[in-house]
Amino acid sequence: MVQCPEQKQDGPGSQPGSVTTRSQPSVFDGIKRFFAAPTAGGIVLALATVAALIFSNSPWAPLYVAFDQIPGEVRIGGDWLVLAKPLQVWVNDLWMAVFFFLVGLEIKREFVHGELSRPAQAALPAVAALGGMALPALIYVAINWGDPAALRGWAIPAATDIAFAIGIVMLLGPRVPPSLKVFLTAVAIIDDLGAIAVIAVFYTAQLSLAMLGAAAACLVLLALLNRAGVRRADLYIVIGLVMWVCVLKSGVHATLAGVATALFIPSDGEDGHSPAEALEHGLHPWVAFGVLPMFAFANAGVSLAGLSWSDLLQPVSLGITAGLVVGKTLGVFGCVWAMVRLGWASAPAGASWGQVFGVSVLCGIGFTMSLFIGGLAFVGLPGDHDTPVKLGVLCGSVLSGVLGALLLARRPR
């Protein structure tokens, strides 16, 4: 901090000619304020996405591909345990397991102490989230009907990116009522829970029963630690890492080990502090400014060379875009409207129907979760599904973000 002396005017109680100091903000103060802002994570994520698109459409495109394919290997006990994967797979399997671990902590907090702890509070966002997953999937299936390979991507437009959606709402400030911010957060968290279930059930490769058994043993051990009141988070994390390896080798996607571990971290603590809360606060900046931007940079790069507007109308791209923009909006808003009209829930306090519609549009920002599911949906299938998936996710997410922000930026009557 730089201290700069400044002459002060004489006044009551001051000595003539006295000099006071006024601290001047430094560059580091500005950086700290930026990273402390609730919108910073979304901004960094957007910058990483733009960087990936620039690199993959520039003379440095071969370097971008080579970066994704940097080999990494973990070897324990000679050949007893060997994990050899390119960088992109390490990011998607290990780094994203940390993200899902944080998601699991957030889900547990909301269901134990937060907005989802009471059925009356949870009903509206829960039904809205289910509608926001079902209708996009139906729209995608309708557009891709008759193509069994393309139908494997039905869950891609069913996801909501909580970082981008919440970031836009925070940027709009007081134009969005607090009740709608809480509603959007709850919808996104329940949506993440649904995405986890979809990955576990529908995007699982050939199973290894032995490795599944070992993962189940790790779960039992975590449950015993929790029941015994053990509060050392490092013990849970070590067992979680062992379970991650077992799940990785079992054929189930390894990120699910992150969620499972988080659910057993103790959430009750002395003086209002718990291991789960401490881990959530400690991990949040690493995930927001490290894990998610790295995932975006490693996965969002798509070459636009030779592409035309007709490529956006391919069934996979069109199904994802329409699912995110139309399906998410109508699914979330329609369920909210029906629940309120039928008297089964109360509308978000202080919010107009136009604002509810705007937040419903923002739920169509799929991005990281949609790209993640898209990377699982077509593994091992012939043909190029990667490009249409990325095109559909990028177009649908950008349209939903821009339209939702414009709708919410208008002052309600």
Image (cartoon, grey):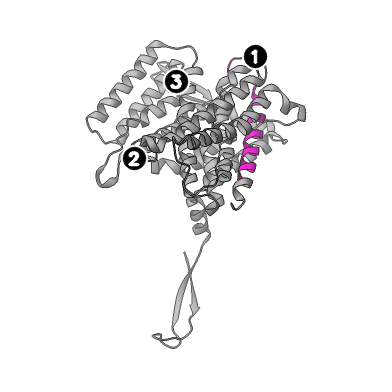
Q: Residue 358 is drawn in which quadrant?
A: top right
Answer with left or right where residue 391 lies relative to residue 343.
right
Q: Nearer the viewer, mark 1 or mark 2?
A: 2
Q: Amino acid at mark 2?
A: His
Visible in this render: residue 70?
A: no
Q: Residue at x 55, y 22 (%)?
A: 376
Visible in this render: residue 118?
A: yes
Q: Assess whether mark 2 and mark 1 are in contact (beta carbons under 8 angstroms).
A: no
**Mark carried by residue 113:** 2
Q: Residue 11 is drawn in which quadrant?
A: bottom left
State the extent of the magenta-drawn residues as a range.
379-405
Q: Residue at x 64, y 24 (%)?
A: 386
What is the spatial separation of the Cα atoms under label 1 and label 2, in whole angstroms?
47 Å
Q: Earlier in the sequence, mark 3 or mark 2?
A: 2
The extreme bottom residue here reads 16
Q: Amino acid at mark 3?
A: Leu
